[in-house]
Amino acid sequence: MIKDEILSRIQKKFPLVAKPFAAIADELDMSEAEVLEILQAEKKAGIIRQTSAIFDTKRLGYKSSLVAFKIQKEKIDAAVEIINSHPGISHNYERNHEFNIWFTLGVSPDSKLGLDKTVEILSKLTEADEYIMLPTLKLFKINVKLNTTGKDAKKEKVKKVVHTEVKMTPLYHDIVRKAQYDIEMVSEPFKNIIDELNISYDTFFGVLKELQEAGYMRRFASILNHRKAGFNANAMVVWDVQEGEKGEAIGASAAEFSAVSHCYLRPKYANWPYNLFTMVHGKTKEETNGIIAEMATEIESKSHMPLYSSREFKKVRIEYFTPADAAWEAKYI
């Protein structure tokens, strides 16, 4: 279906031009109006979650970590409300494990509390029985592209990003602030940014290109709502693999699976032996389990475990360079 082709296209490489939907239309031998009509309908239906720049939290100076809390069942609802009140929480799920609440937290470069102290405060406020912090030790892949056409190969090459330094001037900060938000499905979706910042399209796209080439921006793309797009079984699969160079080689191999959107090495603990994390997406649990079983034939691990989410409490983007972090911290300093 042409709709699936368009959804595939905007997930992979969104055109950074003044009229991106006209560019997509030219590629697919359609009119801009036809492309916009389809995308506006998909947006209204909630299939398209957000279309924006996707930045690297760490490269922008933020400290971040995946965190798992062990929360008593009767305390979950109150705990989730407390956790989600922090502006640096982007994802928060209940998963099928004794560590049952999993969230990602980022704190700004200006944070007075810092990452460790913030997690400590959240654990006390939520009355967590135990928690583990799982920061990224090695990132192999972060690229959510749902196979809407069914044509994607089982494996893909993962492009390595060579990080270089960019001088983050006030203009660059302004562009990050603007480009991080969802664009409208209209002919010139970037025009408001151009007008508000009083810059040219060339300047705007030039800065985004520079930020992407330096690793500050991962990509500009549309992110789909997994379940509404038909991908109802998404598992965080954790693997107990060797540490060191061997583990890095295993992680690089795991990242090549197209169904894997995120792939990281994280620390091990006495109460948590799993250090390789892969997010695997499928339309059904059977399909996802089949992918995991296939991966297990190639991944050398002592054991692995799929953690499915039973509830999604929050899934947003961190808002970079806003006063919200300082306002939250002011309550606890």
Image (tube, rainbow, N blue to C red):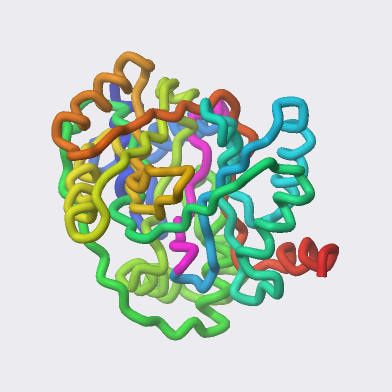
Q: Position of residue 187 (x, y in %)?
A: 47, 48
Total marks placed: 0
Image: 106 above or below 290: below
Q: Nearer the viewer, residue 128 or 41?
A: 128
Image: 311 above or below 85: above
Image: 330 above or below 69: below
Identify the residue at horizontal 42%, vertical 22% (top origin): 233
**Horizontal relation, residue 284 to residue 80: left or right:** left
Identify the residue at horizontal 37%, vertical 43% (top origin): 274
- Is residue 49 part of the magenta span, yes or no? yes
Q: Which of 252 and 10 is in front in this view?
A: 252
Numbered range of the magenta stretch: 44-58
Q: Position of residue 171 (x, y in %)?
A: 54, 80
Image: 86 above or below 151: below
- Is residue 223 part of the magenta span, yes or no? no
Determine if residue 79 is in view. yes
Most extreme residue toward the right, as rendered?
Answer: 331
**Horizontal relation, residue 71 to residue 210: left or right:** right
**Horizontal relation, residue 32 to residue 171: left or right:** left
Q: Nearer the viewer, residue 182 or 76?
A: 76
Q: In which quarter of the image is residue 324?
A: bottom right
Determine if residue 53 is in view. no
Q: Where is residue 278 in the image (x, y as percent from the top left)?
A: 34, 40
The image quadrant where one finds the N terminus is top left
Identify the residue at horizontal 37%, vertical 60% (top origin): 137
Q: Nearer the viewer, residue 246 or 207?
A: 246
Q: In which quarter of the image is residue 145?
A: top left
**Horizontal relation, residue 128 to residue 241: left or right:** right
Q: Position of residue 312 (x, y in %)?
A: 59, 31
Identify the residue at horizontal 30%, vertical 38% (top origin): 260
